[in-house]
Image (spheres, grey):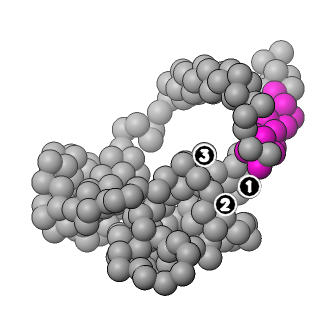
């Protein structure tokens, strides 16, 4: 994973499956919590110019939200090399398995799924049977959400322990970003604790 400048990202929308739509809520979450999920990029096929140039494979909404926040770079997973079929699988599978789809959205990707990632056909069929409604995971109960958050917090603690052990070797920019996120958590914790009293 690395931070990639927006200047290095091509406007190519080959893998964009739907328009980004309103990204204001996503931008608000990123502004408050930071970019929790990286976008997926690959080197722009056929690029022969100076410097690096990337093509977006997945994460178009996150890019738009970051632009709305006037950020100049994005946290990205750079996949090199990434064959077209694998890029399509990444673009389609990520959204198919994690995001709510409307009937029109599903109809728009049927051909791509059948052609590029036939192994995802059962997920497509399940999404179509649900009529493009929110998947059950998105309608979690408060108890389920609390359990999921507890697991994620536990995983975060492990990641922070590793970060602490490697603090001296961490780049100054990495330290700054980590401290920025931790400061927000420190401000949030007393509010959460107050709600439990």
Q: Earlier in the sequence, mark 2 or mark 3?
A: 2
* Magenta stretch in the rendered image: 173-189
Q: Nearer the viewer, residue 117 or 149?
A: 117
Q: What residue do we see at 49% from left, 84% from top?
A: 49
**Residue placed under numbered mark 3 in the picture:** 36
Q: Nearer the viewer, residue 18 or 11?
A: 11
Q: What residue do we see at 35% from left, 80% from top?
A: 46
176 relative position to 19: left or right: right
Depicted 112 relative to depicted 180: above or below: below
Find numbered disc 3 in the image and state the secondary structure of the residue it sits on. Answer: loop
Residue 161 image offset from top left, x and y in percent: 68, 21
Q: Is residue 104 visible?
A: yes
Q: Residue furthest top?
A: 197
Q: What residue do we see at 74% from left, 44% from top?
A: 171
Find numbered disc 2 in the image and state the secondary structure of the residue it sits on. Answer: helix
**Residue placed under numbered mark 1 in the picture:** 31
Q: Nearer the viewer, residue 126 or 112?
A: 112
44 relative position to 23: left or right: left
Q: Residues within 10 Å of mark 2 (few under 14, many from 20)?
A: many
**Residue placed under numbered mark 2 in the picture:** 27
Q: Is residue 178 magenta?
A: yes
For the residues marked 2 and 1, what is the alpha-carbon distance in whole angstroms? 6 Å
Quadrant for the C terminus, please: top right
Q: Are marks 2 and 1 in contact (CB under 8 Å)?
A: yes
Disc ID at residue 162: none
Q: Earlier in the sequence, mark 1 or mark 3?
A: 1
């Amino acid at each position: 994973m690395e931070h990639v400048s927006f200047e290095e990202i091509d406007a190519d929308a080959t893998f964009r499956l739907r328009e980004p739509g309103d990204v204001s809520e996503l931008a608000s979450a990123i502004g408050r919590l930071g970019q929790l999920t990286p976008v997926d990029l690959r080197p722009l096929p056929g690029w022969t110019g100076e410097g690096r140039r990337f093509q977006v494979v997945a994460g178009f909404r996150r890019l738009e939200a970051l632009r709305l926040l006037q950020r100049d770079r994005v946290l990205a997973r750079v996949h090199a090399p990434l064959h077209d079929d694998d890029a399509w699988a990444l673009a389609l599978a990520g959204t198919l398995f994690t995001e709510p789809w409307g009937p029109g959205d599903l109809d728009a990707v049927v051909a791509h799924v059948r052609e590029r990632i036939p192994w995802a056909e059962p997920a497509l069929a399940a999404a179509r049977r649900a009529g493009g409604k929110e998947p059950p995971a998105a309608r979690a109960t408060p108890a389920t959400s609390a359990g999921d958050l507890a697991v994620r917090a536990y995983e975060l603690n492990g990641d922070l322990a590793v970060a602490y052990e490697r603090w001296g070797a961490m780049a100054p920019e990495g330290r700054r970003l980590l401290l920025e996120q931790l400061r927000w958590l420190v401000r949030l914790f007393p509010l959460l604790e107050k709600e439990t009293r």
